[in-house]
Image (cartoon, helix red, strand yellow):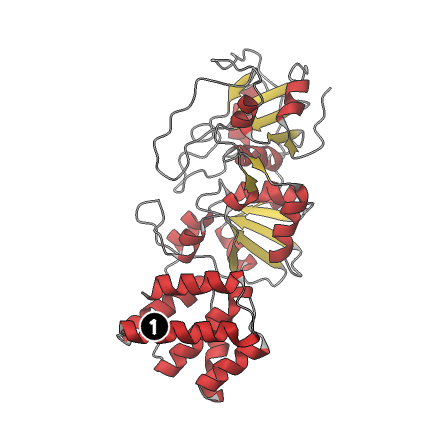
Amino acid sequence: MLQIETPLVSVDWLHKNIEAENLIVMDATIPKVSGLCFEKTQSYIPKSQFFDMKKKFSDTSAEFPNTIPSKSQFEAEAQQLGINNNSAIVVYDQHGIYSSARAWWLFRYFGHNNVAVLDGGLRQWIKKDFSTTDTYINQTVKGNFKATIHSELITNYEGIQALSKSKETLILDARSSKRFSGETPEPRKGLRSGTIPNSVNLPYTELFNGNTLKSKQELKSIFYKLVNHQDKLVFSCGSGITACNLVLAASVSGYKNITVYDGSWTEYGTLTHYAMDTPNWTKDELMAYILLYAAHSDFKEDNHERNVIISKVDMITFQKIHKEFSEDNDFQSIQKIITSVNAHNYSSQNIDQLLADIKGLFFADGNFDVKEHAMLLFLKRILK
């Protein structure tokens, strides 16, 4: 019997094992949230069945999209696909890797570990010139799969509220940087922009080289830059789909204590109400806040940068604003900066002077690096 030992398998591996007796191949394709027109291709990997995530493997009666189904629903639908307790399952999608990781994680949650994502999906399979078929197989034999829930792999709204306050937990958000910062609106109509408190952004698109995941070493390097002392990683996105891409990459990198926030930002943004008045800052306080934000392009301000800020404002102002800044998340910081600049009616000349002060801050240590250059461009964009 075929046993899958890794969360990710290559198309070469699948091609070699395609005739294995206990192999189940699943096409878990769904349209991307970009809203672009998408038509499922009529080309499939041999032995494929359709894993209908939207209608059969989600709770369609739930308020939010892609909500995890009940144990009985998942078990029954899996059995209809001929899945047995000893089945070796490979899931893929037609985008490369997009929704297939969600299917993989659902199987893990419901107790089936003999499952993997196909690296590069259908695109990589076709790129290797492996044969395809134009129909799914017709499964006529019901499987004997029995689900066992692993509740530690999923958290809900109440759970994420507690986890966001834990210093031992890191929440990583898979949305694009502009959605995370609130620069572009959420694709779901009526959903406000924002972030879960104390979360950090890791756009899922940064995990890939073309259709396939980056190497294990590259992925480990990405997580190493974000994970400090935390021993638990929690993943979120818009509605629980691309968060699973981060989970897949973290699993490949060797992380074990990992959880998906099932409702993700769609649930959190709906159930919480973010209301923030414009800070009643003086111009000096606003300058101190902006310079602190800029200094944290590398997540900390050094002594050179701190001295520059103190040279612009008095120590009491610096200490007051530093305390406030340290308590704000990235989204709050951006909103405070934008609303305060508007409240003070800054002219183009005022903005240019602010940007000059920011650039002077970056040159304080004699080195204007890539992160500082990106921060300067970002602040120029939101201030102007």
Residue 319: image x %, image y %? 50, 83
Picture quarter with the N terminus:
top right
The amino acid beneath tag 1 is: Asp
Q: Residue at x 64, y 17 (%)?
A: 18
Q: Which residue, given by chain and number where applicable, does mark 1 sit on? A: 352
Q: Residues within 10 Å of mark 1 (few under 14, many from 20)?
A: some
Q: Nearer the viewer, residue 80 or 164?
A: 164
Identity of the residue furthest to the front in this view: 366
Q: Nearer the viewer, residue 209 or 73?
A: 209
Residue 266: image x %, image y %? 41, 48
Q: Quadrant of residue 120?
A: top right
Question: From what the image shows, is residue 148 above or below residue 342?
Answer: above
Question: From what the image shows, is residue 115 above or below residue 343?
Answer: above
Q: Quadrant of residue 90?
A: top right
Question: From what the image shows, is residue 321 above or below residue 225?
Answer: below
Q: Residue at x 46, y 63 (%)?
A: 375
Question: From what the image shows, is residue 254 above or below residue 54?
Answer: below
| Side (left or right) of 285 relative to 250 | left
| Side (left or right) of 208 relative to 61 | right
- One can see residue 76 in this view: no
Tally the numbered discs.
1
- One can see residue 383 in this view: yes
| Side (left or right) of 324 relative to 141 | left
Residue 219: image x %, image y %? 63, 46
Picture quarter with the C terminus:
bottom left
Residue 263: image x %, image y %? 46, 46
Which SS class for mark 1?
helix
Q: Residue at x 50, y 65 (%)?
A: 372
